[in-house]
Every structure is written in C-alpha cells, then in structure tokens.
Image: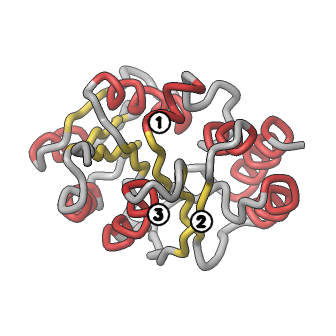
Amino acid sequence: MTEQKIVAVIPALNEEGTISKVIRGVKKYVDEIILVDDASTDKTAIIAQREGAIVLSHKKNQGYDKSIDDGFALAAKRGTTIILTFDGDGQHDPEDIPKIIEPILNGEADVVVGKRPHYARIAEHLFALVAKIKANIEDPLCGLKAYHITVYKDIGYFDRISSIGTQLTFNAKKRGYKVVQKNITLNERGDIPRFGRRVKANWKIFKAIFKTIC
C-alpha cells in the first residue's frame, strides 16, 4: 500500500486558551498540522508555531470558509493524501480522529463526516433535517471531517459560497463520492462560538442552507 500522508487543517481565531492542548492531541494522529490564523489578536499563532504547527496567517479576518480553503490549498501543495478538519476551540476530542480517517485509509469512504451528539442552535437542527432529507447527511455543520485528496482536487476548491464549511461535502455527494458518517464526542466551550452569538449565528446558518442544498 502506498504510504498515506495525513494533514490536519485547523482554522483558529483567538484560541490561545485551547490551541496548545488541541495541537498536542491532534499531532499524535496526523503527519502535519496546518493552523490557519484568521487575524487573531492574541497569541494563537505564536503558540501554534511553538507546538510545531505550520502557521498560515491572514492579515485581516476573512472567516471560517476562507480559512479552511487556504488550509486545504496549502495541504494539497504539501502532498497530503487525507485532509482532516479540526476545530481549535477544544470541543473536538482528538481520540475521535482514528475513527474519522480509518474508512478513507481502508478505501471504504472518500469523505467522512463527524456526527455530534447534540446541536447548539435551532438553525443547526434545521440544517441537519434538510441535509438528511436531501443528501442523507445528518450533521453537515460538524467541523470534524476527513477528505481524500482526490475529492478536493476533482472539485478544485473547498468553499466558494460561504456555506460554513459544507460545500465540499455536498458537492462530493452529488458527484458520487462515498460519504460515511461517524459518531463523535463533543466537549463544551466556555466562550463565544466561532459563528458568533445566537441571532447572528442562526442567520449565517439559514443562508448556508439555501446556498447549498435548497
């Protein structure tokens, strides 16, 4: 079997309180970590570099989708086989990584989507319901996913419509790639989620629903 290179892409904005622990946990299961610092005003980038991550920094805030997009582009240039997305806020458990990448390593899937035990917002429930009906994907907004590089190279981008990180998954499904879902654990975070506060976050999610699958 050809050796597989696994790269984790972690988008981060002001995650100095969690990023060290996240990187230490993730690097046990991947070959490289690319942290995309979306113009943090704290020490996120400095800490990430200290922990051994490759840091790609935005001079101004460009959002979650652009951060992932840039991270995927760099991972592809570095010869990755599997790209894993992982949140920098400490909500994901690194011990779930093997179950997310294993179906791709075994040739059983092209994309693996994590399924969280619960959702934080009303709009997430709606997105999950619509995605289940339209594409048989139960938790499209989960930030813990894995993709074989052929999916990314075929489609050519991660996200162009501000779909909150879901466009590549849905496009892969439409093109006949095999999408598998795996249950994951979820830790609570004490600060404001990356989507923002409730009203703003729900509005972003509602817009993403219509852009991607409605």
Q: Residue sitting at 27 percent across and 60 percent down? A: 22
Image-based side of 60 in relation to 213, left or right: left
Which residue type carries mark 2? Gln
Q: Residue sitting at 62 percent across and 51 percent down? A: 178
Give the residue pinned by disc 3: 191
Measured Cα–Cα span from mark 3 to mark 2: 28 Å
Displayed quadrant of residue 60 = top left
Marker disc for residue 179:
none
Q: Residue sitting at 74 percent across and 49 percent down? A: 205
Give the residue pinned by disc 1: 68
Say few, some or many: other residues with alpha carbon within 10 Å of mark 2 (under 14 / 14 to 19 / 20 or more).
many
**Residue 44 shows in the view:** no
Earlier sequence position, callout 3 versus callout 2: 2
Earlier sequence position, callout 1 versus callout 2: 1
- Pointer 1 with pointer 3, Cβ within 8 A: no
Q: Callout 2: helix, strand or loop?
A: strand
Displayed quadrant of residue 139 = bottom right
Residue 43 image point, x, y percent = 22, 43
